[in-house]
Image (cartoon, rainbow, N blue to C red):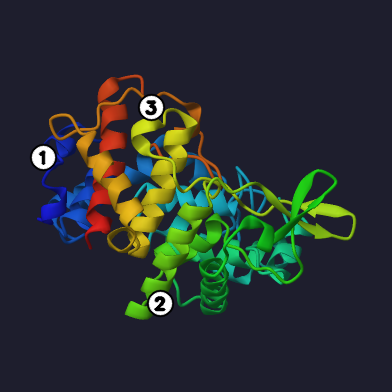
Amino acid sequence: MNPAIEGVDVARLLEIAGPSIAYRTRTEVLGEPADSLACRTLQERIPGDPLVRRVASSQRDDGWLGTSFHGRDGIEAGVRILCEKGLARDHPVLARALDALETGDDRLHLGIGKAGRALDEAGLGGSEMIRAAVFAYAGDEERAGVQAQIGEALRGLETVVCVESIDEISTLFRGKRIFRAGVRWPSIYHLRLLAGSHGWRTAERVRRAAEAVERMIDLSPIPEIYLKRGSQLIAPASFAMTDFRSDFAGTFGYGALLWLQRTELLARLGAVPLVAALHAQVGRLETSLEGGLLMRRIQHPSFRNWGAYAGLALERDWRAPSRRIADLTFRTLLILHHAAA
C-alpha cells in the first residue's frame, strides 16, 4: 500500500462504499486486477446505478449521448459520469459514445455555439480541447486530435509561468476584464486534459506545469477574464480556476467542491510534491481525517448535480451520513494517493 494513504481507513471505506467507489479504490489505489473476482462482481453492479442507467438511456442509435455536446445533458457530461462511476472502458455504452464523439465534428457546437471555436482559436480551451479532455477521462489519449490539444494545454500553462500580474494579460473593457490580444490562458479543461493523459510527461514538462500552478497560487484570487470577439464577451471555462490559494480546511459547500476537484487534478498532474503551498494544502486535508475517514458535514447540491462542471458524489445519495462520508473520504484518498505517486 502507498504509505501516503496510511492515514485513510481503506478497509472501512470499502465496507461502507457503493460499487463505484469500491471498484475504483481496489483498481486505482490498491492496484487490484480488474479481472479479480471481487472487481468483476463490483463491475457487474455499476451498470445498474441509477445515474449510469440514466446516461445509458440517453444513448442514440449512433452512440451519441443526449442531445448536446457541452452542458448538463450532453455527451461531455455523460462520458464524465460513466468514467467517474468506474464503468469499464470497453462497456458498449462507453465505447460507442467515444467512437461517436471522435467522428461528431458537426455536433461540437451543440450547447456551446460559436464560442467553442472562438475559444479554441484564441488558445483558451474551447470545443476541441473539451473533446480531448473527454477522451482523457477515459484514458484514451490516442484519439484523433488529442495530442494537438495536449500541446495547446502545455502552451497555456507555459504562459502563466512568466506572468507577474493580471494586468500583463488583461485590460478593462466596460467594467470587465478582457484578455489582451494573443494571450493564452488555462481553463479547467487544460487541467483535465493533462491530468488524464500521460504521453506528454517528462520531468521537465511536469516541472514547468508545477511552476505554472505555483504562479496561479501567487496570482490568486484571479478575476473573471473574458475573450472579446467583436462586440461579444465570451467566458472561458474558469470553473475552479480563480482561487488556487483556497484551503479545504476553510471551505464548505460549493467551495469544497471546487477545492476537491481542482486539487485532485493537480495531484494527478504531479504538481503537489513540487509546489510547497499546494503540498501544505494537501497536508491540511490529511489532518482533517477523523479515525481515517473524512467526517465533515458538507451538504451542497453541486456534489450530486452532475454536469460538465459540477458533480463529485458517486454514492446514490447522501441521505445516510455514511454515503457522504464514503464520497468525501474517497476523494481524499485519491488526492493523497496521486499526490505521492
Contact, mark 2 vs mark 1 (Cβ under 8 Å) = no
| SS under mark 3 | loop
Q: CA distance from mark 3 to mark 2?
A: 40 Å
Of the numbered discs 2 and 1, the one sitting upstream in the chain is 1
Q: Which mark is residue 11?
A: 1
Q: Residue at x 53, y 77 (%)?
A: 151
Q: Quadrant of the C terminus?
A: bottom left
| 91 or 312, nearer to the observer | 312
Q: Say what amino acid the circle numbered 1 marks.
A: Ala
Dot 3: within a 10 Å radius of its alpha carbon, few (fewer than 14), some, or many (20 or more) residues?
A: few
* x then y, percent, for residue 127: 66, 63
Image coords of residue 299 (percent x, y): 41, 23
Amino acid found under the numbered disc labelled 3:
Asp
Label 2 belongs to which residue? Answer: 205
> Quarter-wise, where is residue 11 in the image?
top left
Q: Is 7 in front, or is 250?
A: 250
- Farthest residue to the front: give it: 164
> Based on the displayed image, in which of its 4 quarters is residue 320 positioned?
top left
Q: Is residue 70 left or right of residue 173?
A: left
Task: Identify residue type, mark 2.
Answer: Arg
Quarter of the image with the N terminus is: bottom left
**Left or right: 177 as drawn, with respect to 280:** right
Q: Is residue 314 visible?
A: no
Q: Earlier in the sequence, mark 3 or mark 2?
A: 2
Gap in angstroms between the C-alphas marked 3 and 1 = 21 Å
Secondary-structure class at tag 1: helix
Q: Which mark is residue 240?
A: none
Residue identifier under label 3: 317
- Percent position (x, y) of residue 177? 74, 50
Q: Residue at x 57, y 62 (%)?
A: 164
For residue 227, which quarter of the picture?
A: bottom right
Q: Residue at x 33, y 57 (%)?
A: 267
